[in-house]
Image: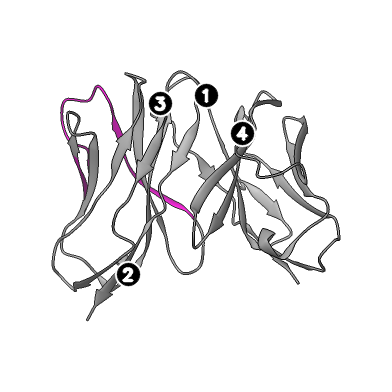
Amino acid sequence: AQKITQTQPGMFVQEKEAVTLDCTYDTSDPSYGLFWYKQPSSGEMIFLIYQGSYDQQNATEGRYSLNFQKARKSANLVISASQLGDSAMYFCAMRMNRDDKIIFGKGTRLHILP
Amino acid sequence: DAGVIQSPRHEVTEMGQEVTLRCKPISGHDYLFWYRQTMMRGLELLIYFNNNVPIDDSGMPEDRFSAKMPNASFSTLKIQPSEPRDSAVYFCASSFSGRVNTEAFFGQGTRLTVV
């Protein structure tokens, strides 16, 4: 069965430190995409970064990078030099090639401390 | 582009009443997804459509929930009768098809409260 697991319900991190948000996934589909979204307190869903299952290199977008370990089926989000504005809920998601379904994990609430 | 548009933004209704949530996807997108967000379950996929046809409704919690997509620019999610446990934020999202690198674009969500 297809599944996304985010094991950290909440995290507290000091401002300017790097933070890693965990995500593991399960699928039998060899072709899939992995996404991270940010949901600030205002509620909107903001797309952050994408990683394809066949991509050889880890994705990066500014301060965001994705630590993709295919054999372990993990796709952790790394935020470098965290800022107060990074405080939000973060969701990991997966899109399967065979049916285009997009499923999400339960999310991790990140708190950046000044 | 106006993005995905959901209405209403907030809905408060009494238990037993019918509730209809509306969604207008981004023009040209051929996939439409309905999600429900709660503290306990996170973001659950309820149903999704491709070219207005429902592909998978296995996430719909009960027969009280139904969804339609009569055309490419409009979808509804209906709950009849509503119950307090249906209280949640309901999101609609749309995307292009064909490639796994295509992200979903979300509406602002509808916060439903059933009292």
Q: Residues within 10 Å of mark 3 (few under 14, many from 20)?
A: many
A31 relative to A113, above or below: above
Distance CA(mark 1)–CA(mark 3) = 8 Å
- Image quarter in which the C terminus of chain A is found: bottom left
> What subunit carries mark 2?
A
Q: Amino acid at mark 4?
A: Ser
Marks 4 and 2 in Cβ contact (< 8 Å) = no
**Going by the picture, which residue comes out furthest to the right?**
B17
Q: Mark 4 sits on what residue?
A: B58
**Location of residue A81 (image quadrant):** bottom left
Is disc 4 on the same chain as disc 1?
A: yes
Q: Does the magenta run of residues contain A54?
A: yes
Q: Earlier in the sequence, mark 1 or mark 4?
A: 4
Q: Residues within 10 Å of mark 4 (few under 14, many from 20)?
A: few
**In front of the other: A40 or B40:** B40
Q: Does the magenta run of residues contain A52?
A: yes
Looking at the image, what colour scheme do you see? one colour
Q: Mark 1 sits on what residue?
A: B97
Label ID, residue B100: 3
